[in-house]
Amino acid sequence: MIEAENNLTLVIKYNSNIITICEVHLNRLKPTQPEYLKFKKNYAKAFCITGNVLDIQDQSIKAIDYYLKALKILKEIDDKKLSNIILNNIALNYNKQGLIQKALECNFESLKIKEELKDSLGIGYSLSNIGIIYDNIGDKQKATDYYDKSLKIREAINDKEGIAQSLICIGRIYVEKKCFLKALIYFEKSLKITELINDKRNMALSLSNIGHVYFAQGDYNNALINYNKSLIIAEHTKNKYDKAISLRDIGFVYSKQKNYSKALEYNLKSMQLMTELGYPSEIAKTAKQLSQIYKVKGDYNNSLQNYELFIQMHDSINNQETKKASIKSQLKYEYEKKAVADSVTLAEEKKLTTVKFKHEENQRYLLYGGLGLTVLFGLFMFNRFRVTQKQKNIINEQKTIVENQKQLVEEKQKEILDSIRYAKRIQQSLMPTEKFIERILNKK
């Protein structure tokens, strides 16, 4: 244990040196230089790791301080993935401290980032975390809605650890409704899954909740068996919170069995751990039990002190302002989600309109191009018509000339033939006939 603490101290010291080195380089570099972004990211990581170590050491207030420094840097460089992780850590610590409004704001901001990143695994956890907060402040209907949404997403992606967690949360709602058989089914399903994947944390929670069912039914022996199993796991994993819860549960069983000495012993151990952790809601529950035990034992002074502590812690997490703040955070998230959805819809409509205008513009260009081509084709055809008509006129003229020449030739030919015929007739008239020649020859 001492060695582990020393290692954690070394981690804090090491990261403190990294923070100093990064600050020196960031003061030297310009934001436009490639190395600037690298050092900025390492700067944020160093704060984040220190916050994680302080978280492990149950120093929530200091852890949140480091987480917030890291978150500021990451927002500057727009690193959504790491910002999302840190927001979850901050929300868990705010919730432990009873700062419900801040816890809800961080969870809704984280959920928004996960939805942008389409991180189904992360969405499932954010929905579950929001459900737990609503459950703690008594809004069971909203809690159930968020648990159901979370379970559906986790089943869709086969997130076994997440499914086990959702089953536990829904089972708790059924316990409060006194539907014990249904609650037990959910808790046993969860226990089976956690044993299969060796998830110690949720295994302890499943056993603890099975103990709650038996306790509510008056079966204190079975309740103790399951609470003790849960305590053994919490001690093995060194989880102070789970250990404190198991100790208080066991103390409550002893109270019911009227074994007040044992009950006081276990509740005092639980209160010591809860005070170290500083969780108002859990301190309130333990203080209430201690007040009742001291009253039975006749120690009215301690009974009154613990009752006053119970009222103080209870009021800090369940006042009207807290409930109003939770509603405000819910409405803010829904408004922002709707605004994003509307902006997306508007962008899509704008895109469709742009495409439509572009299509119409293209059609106009095609029409104008077609008309232009038609005009050009018309001009070309008109020009060809003119050329053809001109050629036709030339051909007609040439044909007329040829016909005239032909007629002239025919006339000349006729004149020549007529002359020949005329000459032939003259010759024929001058030449003696065959009969005349024959008569002359006969005379001789």
Image: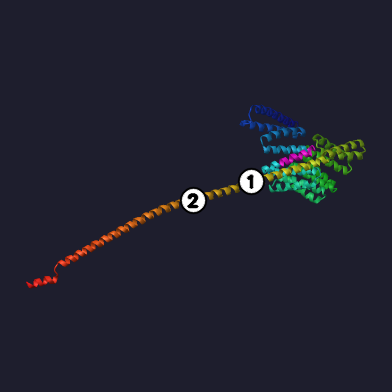
Give the left or right position of residue 24, taking residue 248 as reference.
left
Image spot of residue 50 (x, y percent): 72, 32
Q: The N terminus appears in which quarter of the rendering?
A: top right
Q: Residue furthest right?
A: 298
**Residue of label 1:** 350
What predominant SS class does the magenta segment belong to? helix
Foreground pick, 342 / 51? 342
- Name which residue lies at 52% across and 49% down: 369
Image spot of residue 341 (x, y percent): 69, 45
Q: Is residue 396 visible?
A: yes
Instruction: Judge whether residue 96 is colored magenta.
Output: yes
Image spot of residue 426 (x, y percent): 18, 65
Say few, some or many: other residues with alpha carbon within 10 Å of mark 1 (under 14 / 14 to 19 / 20 or more).
few
**Residue of label 2:** 375
Instruction: Judge whether residue 259 is colored magenta.
Output: no
Say few, some or many: other residues with alpha carbon within 10 Å of mark 2 (under 14 / 14 to 19 / 20 or more).
few
Q: Amino acid at mark 1?
A: Lys
Q: Amino acid at mark 2?
A: Val
Start-end of magenta stretch:
95-111
How far apart are the two marked residues, 2 and 1, measured between alpha carbons?
36 Å
- For marks 2 and 1, the one nearer the N-term is 1
Q: The C terminus appears in which quarter of the rendering?
A: bottom left
Corner quadrant of residue 229 = top right
Give the left or right position of residue 411, taking residue 332 as reference.
left
**On residue 335, which mark appears?**
none
Corner quadrant of residue 99 = top right
Element marked by disc 1:
helix
Image spot of residue 160 (x, y percent): 71, 46
